[in-house]
Image (cartoon, grey):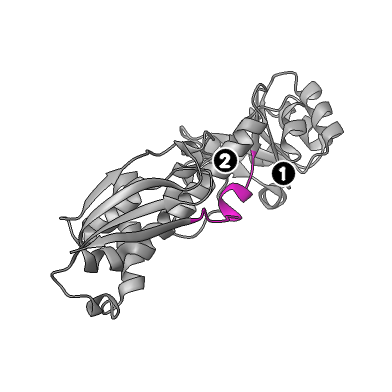
Amino acid sequence: MDLATDIERAVAQALSEDIGTGDATAGLVPEHFRAHARIVVREESVLCGTAWLDQVFRQLDRRIGVSWHAQDGDLVAANTVICDLRGSARPLLTGERTALNFLQTLSAVATKTRAYVHAVAGTRAAILDTRKTLPGLRLALKYAVKTGGGVNHRTGLYDGILIKENHISAAGGIQQVLAEANKVNGEIPIQIEVENTEQLEQALGNGATLILLDNFTIPELKKAVVLNAGRAQLEASGGITLKSVREIAETGVDRISIGSLTKDIEAVDLSMRFISMA
């Protein structure tokens, strides 16, 4: 599914679960009332999710005018007006929460990703996301990671092979599982996760070109980079924080994947206020 189609789907689902059989509160406002509303960001953040907000009000009332004063990827200061909306008061009220839910969630992911990207600046390491996403919002959250300057890992189980401990065990070993992966792989990447340097050596010896180092310590990561000698791309993962990511990047790994980018989300503080009614 392309992103535009996914935005339509996600917004329709979000509006459906919120409105149900109808907005019982917005109906208290006279139908003919028009309003001018503003959205303000209350903390410094990387803006992300404008297309989702646009889609919310497009599905509710195409006549609502949305004027953005910043775009996705912009770093906006606290207490900045980022958007003006004008139109019928009822759909503005109905869509407020859904629109802000998307905007504050995606902006939070972009902001967090930007912090990690800045933390490793000057090293060779790229910051990647994982499949640890909120159900139904995977494409949206991965878009937010890219907006924050990160790189997307595989989207799902269909566009990349990631061989983990249970796959290795079930297949009979690293040699066997890599052999099977090479038989079934078409154009998708093959990655194998290892838990120690012994497994790393086995993976390299069997032609692995993309290797995930799971919960390696700093000394282990440094040793892995030396053992690898540039043969494969190395990815560090497991328990990585903003405090530790720089030291990990300086070991020389190529990639650092961080599940908390899209899993542990603290929403950006946004508000929508009506400034005039007519």
At horizontal 67% and vertical 23% (from top left) the residue drawn is: 123
Q: What stretch is highlighted in magenta?
A: 257-269
Under circle 2, the secondary element is: helix
Query: From the viewer's perspective, is residue 56 above or below residue 20?
Result: above
Q: Is residue 183 part of the magenta span, yes or no?
A: no
- Front one among 143 and 226: 143
User: Given the current orientation, which residue lies at the most extreme top position?
Assistant: 229
- Front one among 111 and 9: 111
Residue 177 located left or right of residue 14 = right
Q: Can you tell which of label 2 and label 1 is closer to the viewer?
A: 2
Pinpoint residue 209: horizontal percent, then vertical percent: 63, 27
At horizontal 34% and vertical 51% (from top left) the residue drawn is: 52
Residue type at mark 2 is Thr
Pinpoint residue 69: horizontal percent, then vertical percent: 34, 40
Q: Name the residue under label 1.
A: 240
Under circle 1, the secondary element is: loop
Residue 50 located left or right of residue 159 = left
At horizontal 71% and vertical 49% (from top left) the residue drawn is: 165
Q: Is residue 264 part of the magenta span, yes or no?
A: yes
Query: From the viewer's perspective, is residue 179 above or below residue 241?
Result: above
Pinpoint residue 155: horizontal percent, then vertical percent: 48, 45
Mark number, residue 195: none
Q: Name the residue under label 2.
A: 113
- Front one among 42 and 275: 275
